[in-house]
Amino acid sequence: MSALPMVVPEPGLPTKVTIYEVGPRDGLQNEKTSVPTPVKAEFVQRLLQAGLPIVEATSFVHPKWVPQLADAAELMTGLTADLGDRARELPVLVPNERGLDRAVELGMRHVAVFASATETFAEKNLNRTLESQFEMFAPTVARAVAQGMDVRGYVSMCFGDPWEGAVPVDQVVAVGKRLLDLGVGQLSLGDTIGVATAGHVRALVQAFVAAGVPTDRLALHFHDTYGQALTNVHAGLQEGVTTYDASAGGLGGCPYAKSATGNLATEDLVWFLTGLGIEHGVDLAAVVGTSTWMAGQLGRPSPSAVVRALGSAG
Ligand code: HMG
Ligand code: MG
């Protein structure tokens, strides 16, 4: 079997897409045991070598909340020693000013804050109310922007919430717009528990556009709980969105949303985009090799269909 699909473009879709790799952060934050720092560093470097243009490396969150990423400073210091300025370009999550201080100390230039579209998840993930999360983000984003940093804003639970059920589209747009008003450059709309379906994706993107937010300010972040992630990417492409988050090998979840399973696998996304003739710049065999190696480190096979189909030696 060929290691790449036959290329048959579909008219009307974007010709180029940016894959925003979140495996080292969204993937490893959810592992039961902490992955050794040198393994994380090798993971990040292998993903960069595979051509992934953006690799979100870690989180400067409270180490008691996410012990799996408590080595964030050590990881970034090691990566900076190996990669120099390239390491400082890797985005990291910062929930608050304390997180920003820690990132700034290491010279990081790209940070991401993460908001909730729902009251319950704001409390569970951030220990804040839906309203008071913005009091935490406002000074964080303002200071980062004032220092010339690039700030991404995640919105979680955009398509459904395990405690509250359906999440109204208008509520998601309101949270996203408030982040943009604070100075966030790009919004990543998260289907944290993987319940989105294609029509819902199109409706949410259309609602943002109707509210004056162009698709080039949007990214889509799918988890594959119900096997809908690629269908949802297709829906996003039909609406003109050109940035998609993905996690090598389909690692991932959220420690504060038990029903969140793995992210859309980078390999599955690369296979899909390649078949459509959409430019992405990623070497599929190299990512599969990286995920196969990481599966060996974690002691279990990757859930990605493409890794299972193509993977052999790491
Ligand atoms: P809190 O307990 O309310 O914090 O947690 P606080 O502001 O009250 O501070 C308490 C103490 O923590 C203070 O220390 C702070 O200095 C310290 P003390 O003065 O008592 O000695 N502290 C920190 N230390 C290190 N780094 C920090 C930090 N902040 C405070 N950054 C907080 C609030 C936001 C910190 C906490 O709730 C937290 O860390 N949450 C992170 C949860 C998380 O990382 N979740 C996963 C990422 S989100 C996700 O996965 C979804 C996404 O993938 C998209 C999708 O799928 O939807 C992005
Ligand atoms: Mg996520």
Image (cartoon, rainbow, N blue to C red):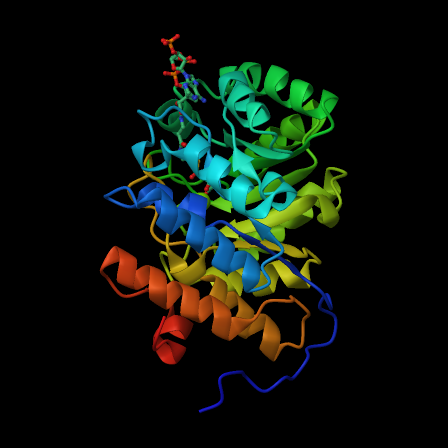
User: Toward the viewer: 86 or 120?
Assistant: 86
Corner quadrant of residue 71: top left
Report the side of 37 relative to 140 (left or right): left
Please state the horizontal and vertical placement of residue 131, each as a whole percent of the image: 52, 17
Residue 79 in view in this figure: yes
Q: Whole-percent x and y of residue 311?
A: 37, 76
Q: Which residue is at a point 53% across and 41% down the rendered structure image?
A: 81
- Which quadrant of the view contains residue 148? top right
Pinpoint residue 180: horizontal percent, then vertical percent.
Answer: 69, 30
Residue found at the very far bottom of the displayed protein: 1
For the residue pair 231 and 31, the one nearer the viewer reads as: 31
Q: Can you say whether 291 is above or below 170 in the image? A: below
User: In the image, what residue occupies the spot 48% across and 66% down?
Assistant: 287
- Ligand 2 visible in quadrant: top left
Q: Position of residue 178 (x, y in %)?
A: 65, 26
Q: Residue furthest front?
A: 81
Rendered-image quadrant of the C terminus: bottom left
Quadrant of the rendering where the N terminus is positioned = bottom left
Asked whether, in this view, residue 228 is left or right of residue 232, the answer is: left
Q: Which residue: 57% across, 21% down?
A: 137
Query: How many numbered dots are placed on residues in this image?
Result: 0
| Residue 56 in view here | no
Above or below residue 40? Residue 302 is below
Foreground of the two, 250 or 214: 250
Task: Write the residue at 51% across / 43% down.
Answer: 79
